[in-house]
Image (tube, rainbow, N blue to C red):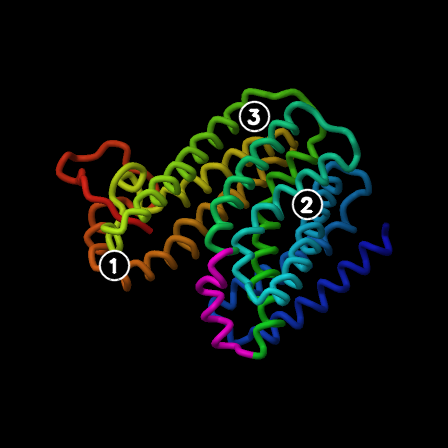
Amino acid sequence: MQTIFLAAASLWCVLAVIWLVALGDAKARWMHWTHALLPIAAVGLYPWLPAGSVPAQAVAQWLAAGAAVWVFLTLVWLLSIAIRNASIMDVVYTPSVSITLVVLLFSDGNYSARQLALAFIVIAWSARLVWHASDTNLTRGEQEPYARWRVRYAGRWWWRSYFQVFLLQGALIWIWMLSLALALAAGPGPLTPTDLAGVALWALGFVFQAGADWQLKRFKAIPENKGKVMRAGFWSLTRHPNYFGETAMWWGYFLFGLAHPYGWLGIASALYVTWFMSKGSAAPMLERHMLKTKPDYAQYVASVPAFFPRILRRKATVRNDEAGS
């Protein structure tokens, strides 16, 4: 086992060097540096922890989760080369979490009602997003921005995509999974009030995300709505109800992680998800696209909160017309 650990750590170090040298021209280089080097820091920390201690077990669980995600996404990268479609990453990013969680949970056969409840909600989240993303990313060819990157980097894209798409997002997923790793490392136990609060928060996020996606799909199915902006339902409360829902679900996972003595450390991953969805990448990238392609979107921006829902709305802001993002 120690030999496998050292081999995996060495291989990641080599890949990290290639990653940072080869993608020196990438935008937001700090993201590449952070996601390439943080696993090395975690690997370097592990040998200094007392063998068998609670911190050592938690770090080992987190590193095992990262290794599983790494292997899974490497296989997906090979598939993307074969089918010339890197946008399948948008389909498989949630299974990389749920499959890893299930494998780690059942690997030692020591699980409980609390851990099974966590696995259930993670699988439900993953399965719904796979179903939602598959229609676009598997049946309609390579999507943006992956198609644009393929044109930009031409013959280099097949190997560059491994770092720019699969390793970068894989490391991001690994950071997000800190609370899930802590929840598993806590060991078996009954459902607690904190766990039930986590389920409730997850359910709120699930309703926001699934409901917003359903409303937007119905809206786009009406030809007369082409080029318009969704303003009704969940989309009248926040410009990004699906991203808000995603964030709420990860805070629910954080509450499950509090079963571990060091579960509070999981707040780092929950805060990262919140930042990423609201300010870091997801919402800002989509907003830039919408402002360029939909003339009415600027008015929508001026009347609807960017991320956190506004439950109480002035009547003057309520609109019956709809449009989407």
The magenta-colored residue range is 139-154
Q: Where does residue 192 sit, x and y in percent of width and height? A: 59, 21
Give the residue pinned by disc 2. 62
In the rendered structure, which disc, 1 or 2, sits on the residue that comes first in sequence?
A: 2
Residue 291 pos. (x, y %): 27, 60
Q: Amino acid at mark 1?
A: Lys
Q: Which mark is residue 42?
A: none
- Judge the density around disc 2: few (<14), some (14-19), many (≥20) Cα neighbours within 10 Å: many
Residue 79 covered by magenta stretch: no
Q: Which residue is mark 1?
A: 294
- First of labels 2, 3 by sequence position: 2
Q: Which residue is mark 3?
A: 195
Residue drawn at (43%, 31%), measured in percent from left and top? 204
Callout 1 crowding tier (Cα within 10 Å): few <14, some 14–19, many ≥20: some
Which SS class for mark 3?
A: helix
Q: CA distance from mark 2 to mark 3?
A: 20 Å
Q: Residue at x 65, y 29 (%)?
A: 115
Residue 162, relative to residue 153: is it above or below? above
**Which is closer to the viewer, label 1 or label 2?**
1
Q: Using a 10 Å C-alpha cutoff, classify the residue at mark 3 as few (fewer than 14 neighbours), some (14 to 19) or many (20 or more).
A: many
